[in-house]
Each structure stands twice: as C-alpha cells, then as structure tokens.
Image (cartoon, rainbow, N blue to C red):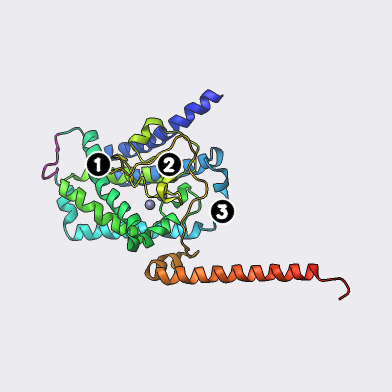
Amino acid sequence: MKTLDTLLDYSLWPLLFGGAVAGMAYGMAHGHGPLAFNITYLILAAVLFTLEKVRPHEEDWHESDGQEIPDFAHTLLTKLSVQVLVVSATVLGIQTQMGDKPGGGFWPSQWPMFFQVALGLVVAEFGLYWAHRVAHEWMPLWRFHAVHHSSKKLWFFNTGRFHFIDTFKSMLFTVPCVAISGAPGPVTVWVGGITAFIGILTHCNIRMKFGWLNYIFNTPGLHRWHHSMDLREGNKNYGENLVLWDLIFRTYYDDSRRRPPKRIGIHEAMPKTFFGQLAVPFYWKRYQAEQKRLKLEAKAAKAAAKKEKRAKETEPAGV
Ligand SMILES: [Zn+2]
Ligand SMILES: [Zn+2]
C-alpha cells in the first residue's frame, strides 16, 4: 500500500501533465486545436478538483478563504484581456508575422516538433521570467502582482487570480520574445497550451513528489516556496513553466529538508472584494496607511476594553 502511495506521489504530476498534452495533441492532429485545448483544460480542472479532495497537500487549505468570487472574476477578466491582446495582435498583423508563416528568422523549422516546442518554451520563458521578476522587485508593478500573492491558500481555482494589468504586462514581455524568434503558429499554440496546463498544475493542492522534475519544470513543490511570506523564499522561483532562467540567474530555491510554509500571503493589506482589488494598486500607499491606522485603532480599543474589564474584576465587592 505504501509502495503504491509513493508510486502515486511521483507519477501524478507526469501523468496529469502528460495526459493534458496527449489530449491537446489528439485535437491538434485532427484540426481542432483550440476546442481540444479547452476540453482538456476543463477535464484537467475537474480531475484536480477531485484529487485535491482525496489527496490534499495541506488539509487546512480546504477551508474557504471567502475569495472564490474574486478568484473567478479575475480569471475571467484576465482571459478576456488575453483575448483582446490576441485580437489586437491579429488586427495589427503581428500574429500573421509570428504565426502563420512556417517559421521565420533563425527559427529551426526543420527540427522535429517536440524540439521546436521545447525551444519555444525556453524563448517564451525568458519573457515570462523577467515579467515575473520585475513584478516582485519593482514596487509599482508589485502592487498589481500582490493581488495574486494575497491568496492565503493555493488550489487549482486561484490559478487565474491575477490583476488583468499584471497579465497584460507578462504578455508585453513575452510576445515580443516569441515574435523575434520567428516561432511558427503551431509552436506558439503549443507554448500557450502548455503554459495553461503547467499553470493550473502549479497551484493545485495535491500531495505529490517531483524528484528531478524540479530541475526542469515549475512544479507545485517549487511554486509553494514562491508564495512564502519570507522573501528569502518568496522572491525566488520566477519561472512559469521551466526553471532554466531561475537556475541561470540564481533565483532557484528548493529545500527538500523542509515543508513549504502553510501560512502564505503578503505582508500588506488587500481589499476583500474584486473591484477593491482592481482599484487598490492605483492608491496603494494611501490604502496601506489607512489600513495600518485602522489596525492600530482596533488594537488600542481592544487593549482599553481589556483594561476596563480587569479593573471591574479587581474592584472591591460592595463598593
Ligand atoms: Zn509571484
Ligand atoms: Zn502563484
């Protein structure tokens, strides 16, 4: 039984990722790429939802954080903004330049598709890595990215919890990298699909082990460190799909001797509502100061009430 469990620990991630890739490959081979991607993604989400119930990594993360509506609304809005960007790229003719050609510039179109997609992932990852890293290291962008990190738990459902401007910025970093490389259309479709699959896997709350996969892919194990409130761990592992650039630029972090923290989130305050979260990056400092003042006032009121209660208790009887 224990052997089977260990086998499952190590084989779940490759099985889930491999299954999703196989589903998309089947659709692409039959000329229904986008449809196959969407169906595969929904099936993967349903499987992750079930596995989170039966094999949770953190039992406590099952409890609701009251953020389901904002999580869902951010997911929809970011998807919409990506669509707008893709349509704009089509209108501007960028996509035709990028995609429909058999490959341009120095792109090795003669390579087998597997290697072309691997190269596409490395190229796209360069943009994704820097987009993510500046969001952590440059305050004006952190205000937007903080929406994602304000989650107090990780599960498949909050994968899309990004401020839409944060997503927009990631696209602005990544699309030019892919365009300059001259990657052909099918490669960009594959990179997009794989990014979505790895993204939802990365956030899932499922007990799994990763072994050497941690040196290639951004696994849930690595991403849980990235959500740590300790910045020595949190400002690491910026890779979206691959950890290559983290290894090269020395921002890779893993510690197999310890468990990633259960208590995650940000040190700053974050509104609870979707619209509040959309607006807060634009008046970040004022909001933080206000919340700090409210917190201090509440603390002082609590201390005063406690003092009064104690005074009443010690009052001599009959006075
Ligand atoms: Zn981050
Ligand atoms: Zn995340």
User: According to the image, label 3 marks what residue?
Assistant: 64
Would residue 184 be found to the left or right of residue 159 on screen?
A: left
Give the amino acid type for the residue marked by disc 3 in the picture.
Answer: Ser
Q: Looking at the image, which residue is at 37% across and 69% down?
A: 282
Residue 216 lies left or right of residue 182; in this view the side is right
Query: What type is the residue that disc 1 sits on?
Result: Val
User: Where residue 33 appears, x then y in whole percent?
Assistant: 29, 44
**Magenta span covers which residues?**
103-110
Q: Nearer the viewer, residue 153 or 41?
A: 153
Upstream in sequence: badge 2 or badge 3: 3
Q: Which residue occupies 35% across, 60% down?
A: 164
Mark closer to the observer (2, 3): 2
Q: Please, what secondary structure does the residue beneath circle 2 have?
A: helix
Measured from the top left, where is residue 114 in percent x and y?
A: 24, 34
Q: Earlier in the sequence, mark 2 or mark 1?
A: 1
Q: Which x, y percent locates residue 56?
A: 53, 40
Q: Which mark is residue 122?
A: 1
Q: Residue at x 75, y 67 (%)?
A: 310
Asked whether the beta carbons under mark 2 and mark 3 sit within 8 Å of each other, the answer is no
Say what amino acid the circle numbered 2 marks: Pro
> In terms of image quadrants, where is residue 30?
top left
Question: Based on the displayed image, in which of its 4 quarters is residue 295 positioned?
Answer: bottom right
Q: Mark 1 or mark 3, which is nearer the start of the sequence?
A: 3
Disc 3 vs disc 1: Cβ atoms closer than 8 Å? no
CA–CA distance between discs 2 and 3? 20 Å
Name the residue at 48% across, 38% down. Answer: 258
Query: Could you give the CA–CA distance between mark 2 and mark 1, rounded to whole angstroms?
Result: 19 Å
Q: Is the magenta stretch mostly helix, strand or loop?
A: loop
Residue at the bottom extreme?
A: 319
Q: Tell me the residue that label 2 is attached to.
A: 220
Q: In which quarter of the image is the C terminus?
A: bottom right
